[in-house]
Amino acid sequence: MSGALGFTEFDERDGTPAFMTGMDQLDRLLITEKVPVPGRPLHAMRRIAMARKIEMVIGGSRQSATSVAVSRWYAERYGDRLKVDFSPGRAVILVRGDPLILKLPLIVGEWDGVADVTKLLPGLTQPMFASLSEGEMQDVVSALPWMQQRFAALEVLASSIRANLEAAIMQMTSQSPHFGESHWASLQFAEKTMKRFLRSKGRTPSRTHDLTALLRSCESAGLPRGMQPILKMIQCDAGVRYSEDVTLDAALAAHHASIDLTAYVAQHLVDKSSSNTVIDDQDLADLVLSMSFGIESSHNGNLLYAFAMADNSIRRLLFSSQHCNWLHREIAGSIAKGRHKDDRLLFTSGRDIRNAPPRHPLKLFYTHMPKFGPEDYKATDIIQVKSVKASDESRYLVLEIEGVRNETARLIIWSELVAPLLETIGNGLAEGRVGGLFA
């Protein structure tokens, strides 16, 4: 049987041409069988042991000469390619504005939260690490746990789907990056994962790149609601693949949001009991993502506010100066009592909001900020406010609105957005005074 291998124990010991040729042929056979490089030494030893009908010790003090010779041959042939990568995945974060790959560690058992960031970020040299500010270090530290949690869910996805994640990373971090290609790969990652979910429910997904339509189909098939707000970060036209206008910021936002979305969908492929929605049991239609205001004299001294809601709608409310002044006093008093922290302070001392999780209220705030145009002032769904009530909840500020035509509206505003709301109202009052709309 040894002859069938093309070499003998003596050839192995002396490293003769017969051994070298025979190992090359055996390795080619393993290649045709699609055995990954790290697994080939063990497969080769197994083939040799079966051919010779012997037992082979592959480690320890009694390691056989054949296993030593095979291991040496593979080490010389493949070098570092033999190393097994146990990392659950990779993602991109910014370090001083540069995209670096965060390589997640394999964690077994409980984790105390301590990690060597220079090993997690291969592009982070020791001198650069020493020069990072506390805020920059916090970006890495805070990114690790939420990435770790999401990649644990991504393990159920096929490699053909996760290949899009790797493509997004490569297109962002290569020496010749193409951020449009990266953005498109992130969309494909999200799209294919949702279509995988639909097939698992016996549904045939439509041939579309419209993530909103796909998410609605997933929700009708049993996926708990809550992910609509981050779709705007991922959705793009196929033309981005050929565009040079896509920015690193847009590609990074799509990358992070696609990881968050796909992990959420993948989690519900295997864990039907967990919902983990963005706002628990609150109604998405009432949750405010962002806001802006406009001033026009035709509105008789009122400020027109547009609120971007979590269900992808826009609510337009017309506030008088009296309502704005009252709200400004109420909200300022609530903040003064410590009811709502201003998270913007985190990102004015070295932190980079681009590294924040996609569902961070401030990230959604800047992503969904409405832009005013002539059509907003002509809209037929404007509610002119007659009365407003404000109440503090544990994580939200809730505004109950009544309109002059008996319409009602409810606005749920994350604690992290209460300070931006106060600033928006203050800016509206200041511009209204300058414009002469009210005293």
Image (cartoon, grey):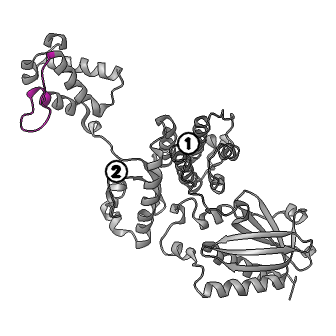
Q: Residue at x 92, y 78 (%)?
A: 300
Q: Is residue 324 visible?
A: yes
* Mark 2 residue element: loop
Q: Main secondary structure of the magenta part?
A: loop
As drawn, 423 above or below 378: below
Whole-percent x, y for residue 245 in the image: 63, 50
As drawn, 396 above or below 222: below
| Foreground: disc 1 or disc 2 | 2
Q: Provide the residue span drawn in magenta.
A: 52-69
To which quarter of the image does residue 71 belong? top left
To which quarter of the image does residue 419 belong? bottom right
Task: Locate the N terminus by quadrant.
Answer: top left
Q: Residues within 10 Å of mark 1 (few under 14, many from 20)?
A: many
The kind of residue on which mark 1 rests is: Phe
- Whether residues under marks 1 and 2 lie with C-beta atoms below 8 angstroms apart, the answer is no
Structural distance between the alpha carbons of marks 1 and 2: 23 Å
Q: Residue at x 45, y 55 (%)?
A: 149
Residue wearing tag 1: 189
Residue wearing tag 2: 106
Please tell me whether residue 207 belongs to the stretch shown in magenta. Answer: no
Which numbered disc covers residue 2? none
The kind of residue on which mark 2 rests is: Leu
Q: Residue at x 6, y 19 (%)?
A: 10
Please tell me whether residue 61 belongs to the stretch shown in magenta. Answer: yes
